[in-house]
Every structure is written in C-alpha cells, then in structure tokens.
Amino acid sequence: MSSLRMTALTRWVAQQHGLDMDEINLQEAGGDASFRHYYRLTLPDGNTRIIMDAPPGQEDSTAFVNIAQQWQAGGLPVPHVFASHLEEGFLLLEDLGDTPLQQRFNDPASVHYHTHNALTLIGELQNRASPETLPRYDSDLLGRELDLFPTWCLERWLAMPAPSQWPALRNTLIEQALSQPVVSVHRDFDAMNLMVHHDKLYMIDFQDAVAGPLSYDMISLLRGRYWRFNAEEFAAAVDAFYRRARQDGRLTSRTRDVTFLGQCQAMAAQRSLKVLGIFCRLTLRDHKSGYLARLPHFLDHLEDSLAALPEHAGFAHWVSEQLRPALVQRCVEAASMEST
C-alpha cells in the first residue's frame, strides 16, 4: 500500500472512532488471492477490529457489504460490518480471530468432525439465505470458469492443446450443474474461508456469492485444498448431505441418491478444472506465488471425480497419461527456477 493510501485509511479509521490518527494501531493481518489486504486495529480500550483495504480500481466491495447485511439478518454467522467507505474501498469489520478451519485439521478424526460441522453450516446457508438477489450461476458463467483450464493451464502454462474429448466433457459438466436445485452459493466454501471464533464457524470472503447448484459449496469443502477424502468417505459425506437436504426440502424425492452422487462428481470435476486454471492465472498474470505447488493436489481431486464418470473415460485417460506427467514436470522446472 502506498503511503498516501495508508494515510487515507488511517484517517478514515480514526474518524470512525473519534480518535486522533496517532492513536490508531494497525498491524497487517494478511491478504488473499485478490487485491484485498487486511489489517488488525487495536483500539485504546483493547478491543480489536479488522480493516479491509479493497482498492476500488481492482475490487468492488458493494456485494460484500450487501451480502453480509442480508446474511446476518437471516441469522447466518458472518462478520459484522461496522462501517464502510465504498468509494475508497475501506471496510471496518468484526474481528473473528486468526483461526481458519484448516488449522483444526490435525488428524482424520478432527477433519471428519469439523467437516461435518461445516456441512451443517452449508445447510443453514441454503435454508436461510434467499438466492433471488444474487447473480445467476448460469451456463455462460459455468462455461467461462471451465475455459480457464484450457486457456491458462494448458495453453499458457503447459503449451499443450486440449484433447478431443474436452468439448463433450465441458457440455456434460455444465448440464449436470444446471440440473440441480438453485440455492445461495458462497462459491469458495473452503476451510480457509471458515473462521473458528469462540468455537463457532463464521463465513468470510463471500463477495462472489451466486444463485447456483445445491452441491457446489459442499464440493468446495470436500474437494478443497487441505484434505483428500477417499471414494468411500466422499460418498458417505455426500449421502449424509443428501439425506439432510431431502428432510428439509432442499431436494425432492424425484432426485435419487445415486443421481445426486453423480451430479456431485460432475460438480467436483468442474471445480477442479476451474481451480487448475485459476491457480495458473494467479501465477502467470497476477504474479502470485505458492499456487503452483497446489496444482498436483487438485489434479488428484480431478482424477478422483473422473473415475466416477465412466462415460468420460477417454478424458480421464488423457489426464493420467498426458496431463499429469506434463504438469508434474513443469512444476519441478518452476520450483527449480525459483530456488536459483
């Protein structure tokens, strides 16, 4: 952040609390994959707040503020927005601490326990937050996300063409996503975006929420960056989610459990392909570090999902025989270049 912007931020924070600028104590509290940065404000009385700096030239925080207010009004656990200056991109938020959910993933037992709690929270989100005011997760958006994979991962990172089976898989994944009930979708319901505060889960980073497929947030969690569930564990978690959704009416009896499991595997393939593209874009275009090391993990997720989609065995074979060796070799080369 430039000194001028830091001065403007400090002045705004001071004004919100009736303090002089020299009474403002700000410490960096991290950033994320976007252009947003966060600071922890410690007030003279010892209370703390989080300041979000979202430069308006790169980020529009209007959706974040609107969604936070709507979801909080619905009784959902999100940070309270004390004040906002959208023209400057400054937000004053409730401090939820420094414990994202993945820090509680200490062993298989703790992973399953906390995953169960997070899946319960997804149900609360879908039952309490209306999707009517959110942008639609339609075929165009799903397609644009999928196209990140051939554009950024294949063409720009690996310099290899998409296989002949790609158009058929792309169409199937879009169709399977659109066949599901439409609910409020956080869109990045990963453990890093769930904060543990006073033993309760809070959602953050929800500004890209959409009205979309019932299974999407569940897949973000089960096929996230911090754990790899085997086929039996994945199926069991999906089945538990399915049964709860049937009980509270999010799913009807017209959707059989085996059908929903297939939809979830297709959704998982869609998200893994999107993430592979996004991580390459973050590296190549945005010059963000650390994302290439995560590519093999999401390649594992992709192969796990494709294994349950036998009609796309040709694409799965290409992934294992051509994509995996090319991607692994390229990651090794990139790591070697970084070390030198």
Image (cartoon, rainbow, N blue to C red):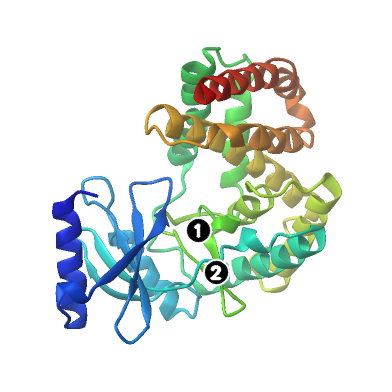
Q: Is residue 68 visible?
A: yes
Q: CA distance from mark 2 to mark 1?
A: 8 Å
187 to the left or right of 220: left
Residue at 50% in and 25% down: 338
SS class of the residue under badge 2? helix
Pointer 2 and pointer 1: residues touching (CB < 8 Å)?
yes
Q: Quadrant of residue 307?
A: top right
Q: Position of residue 146 (x, y in %)?
A: 52, 33
Relative to 151, say whether 217 is above or below: below
Q: Position of residue 214 (x, y in %)?
A: 60, 57
Residue at 37% in and 29% down: 285
Relative to 80, say whether 282 is above or below: above
Q: Amino acid at mark 1?
A: His
196 to the left or right of 141: right
Residue at 23% in and 58% down: 89
Q: According to the image, label 2 marks what residue?
A: 125
Q: Amino acid at mark 2?
A: Leu
Residue at 70% in and 62% down: 115
Q: Quadrant of residue 303?
A: top right
Q: Position of residue 245 (x, y in %)?
A: 69, 66
Q: Is residue 253 visible?
A: no
74 to the left or right of 103: left
SS class of the residue under badge 1? loop
Relative to 244, say whether 139 is above or below: above
113 to the left or right of 142: right
Q: Quadrant of residue 104?
A: bottom right
Q: Give the number of the disc on residue 267.
A: none
Q: According to the image, label 1 marks what residue?
A: 186
Neighbourhood count class around disc 1 (C-alpha, 10 Å): few under 14, some 14–19, many 20 upward: many
